[in-house]
Image (spheres, rainbow, N blue to C red):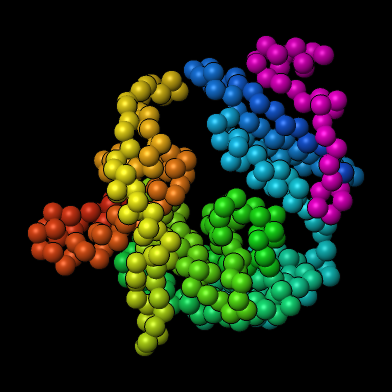
């Protein structure tokens, strides 16, 4: 009761057993889950609630807790994702003594701990392929051997696009020694159970140093859509280490991701970047709709002026505002923002260099941004 009074004085909420829902981890360990909508005691400047999901799992003398939180206005988008994360939690026992050593990992610059973790995860239908230059380890659900060819294609293409494009256009601040993981889930359900955001087909997680996606093709062979996701997410992975373990602003990061998603592997084993067909129609419609009207209002949290948009007509974001969008703002208007990011990068890379007047005005935007970010990060 003393703890409860102390919590109330601080504006906190203690999680009670009565309010908990009984759950189980993916492998049957009993747990509890709480779902709350509360105004954060630290967010005294706003009345906006936060949507929170708490969960705990206990096995013998060890208890693990999860806390997932977002602003209340994002509840609709993230509610199912939060519950998916909780339901996918798996309690791993230490079975290192029973793990089979994978010789394919010999010579790969992995720590002993990370190698063991990879080997322990290769259960049931999972297998591993190492890329030609040993910069990538591809973990994949064989899906009845369907994904064997896809894994080999990834191991080859991911090294080639890095060598031919990423490293040429974005020389790293210092040699990249991190071995990156690419995880190919067996299907969409497994991808989302592993933490894949709703509406996505791939994502880069800097915390686990993993590129995660699945083969969304209905065919038995890898198609352009699946490889487009690979090239997009592989860029996020590369640029993070190239800059110095920092992600660029969304217009630059997502715009380039979609720019490379249009890469086609052709004659001479070379990549050629083409317009990314996922974005072309969307940005054309947004341009016809015109710029989204906005008014400047004061953000109660920071006291700064921010833009409040009228998005009802599906218009684009005025450019001077677009390049200053936070990640949250970018993702809150995803269809148009991604298309606008792609079109801006495609214009600066494909059209500006061919026009001397444009090149004189705008030709240094991308290298200046990258060099400045890299210098500041390091």
Residue 54, quarter of picture: top right
Residue 333, quarter of picture: top left
Location of residue 82 in the rendering, given as x and y in whole percent from the top left corner: 67, 42
Residue lying furthest left: 357
268 shown above or below 97: below
Q: Residue at x 66, y 26 (%)?
A: 37
Residue 184, magenta (yes or no): no
Any part of residue 244 in sight = no
Q: Residue at x 70, y 75 (%)?
A: 142
Any part of residue 200 in sight = yes
Location of residue 86 in the rendering, given as x and y in whole percent from the top left corner: 73, 45
Location of residue 98 in the rendering, given as x and y in whole percent from the top left corner: 84, 70
374 shown above or below 11: below
| Along the viewing direction, whichever of 290 and 327 lies nearer the viewer | 290
**Residue segment shown in magenta:** 1-29
Q: Residue at x 77, y 16 (%)?
A: 4
Q: Is residue 348 left or right of residue 358?
A: right
Residue lying furthest bottom: 268
Q: Residue at x 40, y 37 (%)?
A: 311
Residue 81, quarter of picture: top right
| Along the viewing direction, whichever of 318 and 118 lies nearer the viewer | 318
């Amino acid at each position: 009761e003393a703890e409860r009074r102390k919590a109330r004085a601080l504006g906190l909420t203690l999680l009670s057993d009565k309010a908990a829902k009984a759950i189980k981890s993916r492998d049957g360990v009993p747990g509890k889950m709480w779902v709350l909508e509360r105004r954060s005691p630290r967010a005294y400047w706003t009345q906006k609630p936060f949507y929170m999901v708490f969960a705990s799992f206990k096995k013998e003398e060890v208890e693990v807790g999860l806390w997932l939180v977002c602003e209340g206005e994002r509840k609709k988008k993230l509610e199912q994702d939060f519950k998916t994360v909780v339901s996918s939690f798996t309690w791993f026992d230490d079975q290192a003594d029973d793990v089979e050593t994978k010789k394919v990992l010999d010579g790969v610059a992995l720590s002993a701990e990370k190698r063991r973790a990879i080997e322990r995860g290769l259960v049931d239908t999972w297998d591993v392929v190492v890329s030609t230059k040993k910069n990538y380890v591809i973990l994949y659900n064989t899906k009845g051997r369907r994904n064997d060819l896809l894994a080999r294609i990834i191991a080859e293409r991911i090294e080639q696009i890095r060598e031919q494009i990423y490293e040429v256009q974005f020389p790293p601040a210092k040699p990249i020694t991190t071995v990156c993981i690419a995880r190919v889930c067996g299907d969409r359900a497994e991808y989302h159970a592993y933490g894949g955001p709703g509406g996505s087909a791939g994502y880069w997680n800097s915390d686990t140093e993993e590129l995660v996606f699945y083969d969304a093709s209905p065919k038995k062979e890898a198609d352009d859509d699946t490889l487009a996701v690979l090239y997009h997410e592989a860029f996020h992975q590369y640029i993070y280490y190239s800059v110095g373990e920092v992600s660029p602003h969304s217009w630059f990061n997502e715009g380039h991701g979609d720019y490379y998603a249009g890469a086609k592997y052709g004659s001479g084993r070379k990549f050629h970047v083409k317009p990314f067909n996922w974005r072309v129609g969307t940005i054309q419609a947004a341009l016809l709709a015109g710029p989204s009207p906005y008014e400047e209002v004061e953000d109660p949290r920071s006291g700064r002026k921010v833009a409040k948009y009228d998005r009802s007509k599906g218009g684009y974001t005025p450019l001077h505002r677009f390049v200053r969008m936070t990640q949250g703002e970018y993702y809150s208007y995803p269809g148009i923002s991604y298309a606008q990011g792609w079109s801006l990068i495609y214009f600066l890379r494909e059209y500006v260099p061919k026009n001397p007047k444009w090149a004189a005005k705008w030709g240094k935007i991308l290298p200046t941004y990258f060099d400045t970010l890299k210098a500041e990060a390091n």
